[in-house]
Amino acid sequence: MKVTLAELKKGQTAIITELNIDAVPLKLLEMGCLPGNTVELLQVAPMGDPIYINVNESHVAIRMETAAQIEVDILTDSH
């Protein structure tokens, strides 16, 4: 099921399929936010922004605005 990273629920794992290269910071690309890589939503901040993800064994905080620019295919449901 294709959704954006911003739509994942806590604990869900997905594969990055596409991203808006102009909207995703270079640092995230360097850390592995690239098509084909697996990402897991670890936590959502109390106010809903940012979200915390695990990509390439790194824990990364990203804004919902950026997460909405990253398309993923869900692999697992939340726990």
Image (spheres, rainbow, N blue to C red):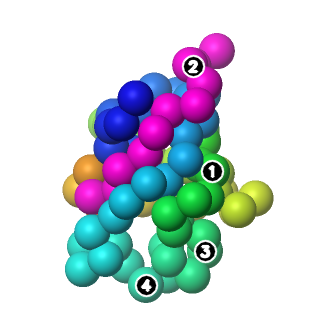
Q: Quadrant of residue 24?
A: bottom left
Q: Earlier in the sequence, mark 4 or mark 3?
A: 4
For the residues labelled 2 and 3, the Cα–Cα distance comes to 24 Å
Nearest to N terminus: mark 2 or mark 1:
1
What amino acid type is highlighted by mark number 3? Met
Alpha carbon separation for disc pair 4 and 2: 29 Å
Q: Residue at x 27, y 69 (%)?
A: 20
* Residue bearing mark 2: 78
Question: In the rendered structure, which amino acid carries the disc numbered 1?
Answer: Thr
- Residue depicted at 24% across the width and 80% down the height: 22
Looking at the image, is mark 4 or mark 2 earlier in the sequence? 4
The residue to which callout 1 is attached is 38
Magenta residues span 69-79
Q: Reading the chain from its start, which is encountered first: label 2 or label 3? A: 3
Q: Which mark is residue 31?
A: 3
Where in the figure is residue 53, as x and y percent of width and height?
Answer: 56, 49
List the residue tagged with mark 4: 26
Q: Is 27 in front, or is 77?
A: 77
Tag nearer the camera, 2 or 1: 1
> How far, Cα to Cα, is label 4 from label 3?
9 Å
Comparing labels 1 and 3, the label whose residue is closer to the camera:
1
In this rendering, position of residue 63 left or right of residue 55:
left
